Amino acid sequence: MQESFFDGETMLLYEGAVIELTSRFEIMQRQIIIREKRNAIKNIYSRIKSDESICGKLFRKKLPKTAEAAQMYLNDIAGLRVIVGFIDDVYQIAEALKKQEDINILSERDYIKNPKPNGYRSYHLVVNLPVRTTESSKRVNAEIQLRTIAMDFWASLEHEMKYKKHIQNQDLICSELKRCADEMASADVDMQAIRDMIAKGE
């Protein structure tokens, strides 16, 4: 059996970060339901980066393959993906998270307003938060991706197809994926506009 990249205590901190952030998003969701009578957060997915993925990223960054280097230089060992209904929900939840006093925002990238060349859209935050164990409190970094259902659908399929080998007509496929991303982004904007029209009429 292969030994884990991190010792049990370190792994517990990353698992704790995921549990802590998930709990905070669930509380946000409950508050939105109470105040606005709607379900903004559709799903919350979480993961701890695999040993293979950690080693691969350290290699690409030309860093030593050690637990110390991973903890110091990789901010996405603990990760969450929060799926929402509308574009406005992305920004509402991001702002709510940024107001939490014990969470430090290390970086944020808005790939919704500034999509990647391939069409990828999402809102990324790298945060630093306290994780409390029985004996102490330590701060841990984690990455959060906020996106709509349409953005997540596209990103999931694009990720799956990207790793298929020996694909023919790769340029055409990339072009079609970009077209689909743009069309889905347009649908997101339209759905937001319809929701706003309904809200004004209530």
Image (cartoon, rainbow, N blue to C red):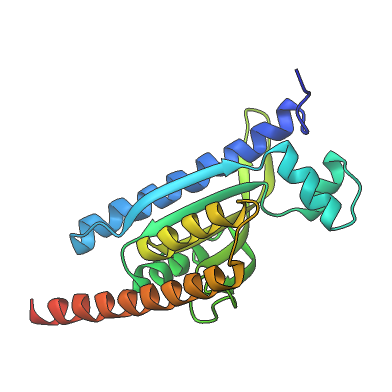
Q: Residue furthest left?
A: 202
At which x and y percent is residue 73? 80, 55
> 101 or 139: nearer the eye?
139
Residue under the image location 37 percent in, 64 percent down: 150
| Vertical arrangement, residue 62 with respect to residue 115, above or below | above
Horizontal side of residue 61 vs 41, given as left or right: right
Q: Residue furthest front?
A: 168
> 17 or 111: nearer the eye?
111
Q: Residue furthest top?
A: 1
> 16 or 134: nearer the eye?
16
> 29 or 150: nearer the eye?
150
| Vertical arrangement, residue 125 with respect to residue 34, above or below | below
Residue under the image location 86 percent in, 48 percent down: 69
| Vertical arrangement, residue 128 with respect to residue 190, above or below | above
Which part of the image, by quadrant, shows the C terminus?
bottom left
Residue under the image location 65 percent in, 32 percent down: 12
Q: Is residue 100 visible?
A: no
At which x and y percent is residue 168? 60, 61
Residue 134 appears in which quarter of the rendering? Answer: top right
Residue 2 appears in which quarter of the rendering? Answer: top right
At which x and y percent is residue 186? 35, 80
Horizontal side of residue 16 vs 55, given as left or right: left
Q: Is residue 114 visible?
A: yes
Horizontal side of residue 124 vs 62, given as left or right: left
Which part of the image, by quadrant, shows the N terminus?
top right
